[in-house]
Image (cartoon, rainbow, N blue to C red):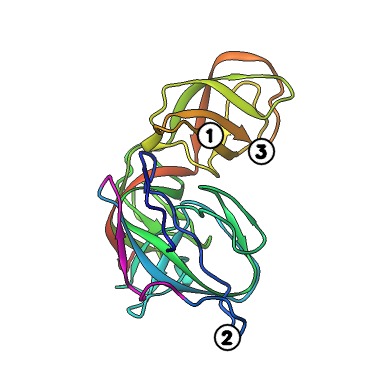
Amino acid sequence: MSIATIQSDRLGANPFVVEGPIVSGSGIPGPNFALGAVAGGDRESEWVYCQLVLAAQTTLQPGQWFQWTRDYVASLLTTAGAVVGQRCGVFSGAAQPPTLTGGPLSAITLAAGTYYIWLQRNGQAPSQVTSATAALVVAETTTTAGQASAPASATVGTKAIANVNFAAANQTFTATTVNGSSLLTGLAGLNAGSGPFIGAAVSGTGISGGTTIAGITYSPNGVVQSITLSANATANGTGVTITATGVLEATLMRPFLSKVN
């Protein structure tokens, strides 16, 4: 079996193993499901089984947007390559690495090759979003592959993404920082189902510019216990307000590319 049988409050059914690279005659098992197969989880989650062909080494991040054809061949969603009418969804994270690097509920780096992945099309999910405004009324593609935008009004030349909305333009919570440590503890104001998510940019007192969330530790019942940052804190602090942006909670309702803005 390729999928986990347990579920979590954070993402519904636990993210799936990326299958591949598939090399004919290599002895590596081929895909375990028919393309277009659907798996479900809690929070109304649904995943679709798709083929992904990579021409070069690629790192997949939780929340990246993909589109797929009627034959369920997926590609990273970008304005230039977006096809109006195609369905789209997000990569929720890899359960384990088939090739280079990766880990539970994490980003994964893949060598060039043919893979089979599960992409989320329904329910609550992380979403890479730039230019998010308080209104969050428009979802659209961007020139950055895998990243969407949520401006207050449509950007000319982008492609509109229908049937998706976002909970907020950012997320704030409080944490304890320790000078020289990358670990945030003493967390408060968090709901595991709505983030924060791996890859989100974080800011706050004692947090260096450009710092992102590199890892999240959960208790067995889905409570966030600690957050690992990509850089060490530069000050000690208790009850420090942390703001996370760039990877937000989205509600997916089988989104598709509806039109050119």
User: Mark 2: which secondary structure?
Assistant: loop
Residue at the spot of label 3? 230
| N-term mark: 1 or 3 | 1
Q: Between disc 1 and disc 2, whose residue precedes?
A: 2
Mark 2 → mark 3, Cα distance in angstroms: 38 Å
Label 2 neighbour load within 10 Å: few <14, some 14-19, many 20+: few
Residue 40 covered by magenta stretch: yes
Element type where label 3 sits in the image: loop
Q: Give the structural element (helix, strand or loop) at label 1.
A: strand
Q: Where is residue 197? Give x, y as percent.
A: 48, 41
Please tell me whether mark 1 or mark 2 is closer to you in this view. 2
Query: Would you say the magenta stretch is mainly helix, strand or loop?
Result: loop
Residue at 37% over, 47% down:
6
Residue 38 coordinates in the image, percent (x, y): 30, 65
- The amino acid sitting under disc 1 is Thr
Question: Is residue 32 located in the magenta-colored stretch of the structure?
Answer: yes
Q: Are marks 1 and 3 in contact (CB under 8 Å)?
A: no
Residue that badge 2 annotates: 24
* Quadrant, the C terminus: bottom left
Q: Give the residue type at disc 2.
A: Ser
Q: Residues within 10 Å of mark 1 (few under 14, many from 20)?
A: some
- Highlighted magenta segment, given as a residue range: 31-43
- Give residue 200's position: percent from left, percent from top: 53, 41
Left or right relative to 100: residue 192 = left
Residue that label 1 marks: 217
- Going by the picture, which residue comes out furthest to the top? 238
Q: First in sequence: mark 2 or mark 3?
A: 2
Between disc 1 and disc 3, the foreground one is 1
Residue 70: x and y in percent read 32, 78
Q: Amino acid at mark 3?
A: Ser
Q: Is residue 44 left or right of residue 202?
A: left
Query: Residue 12 vs residue 234: left or right?
Result: left
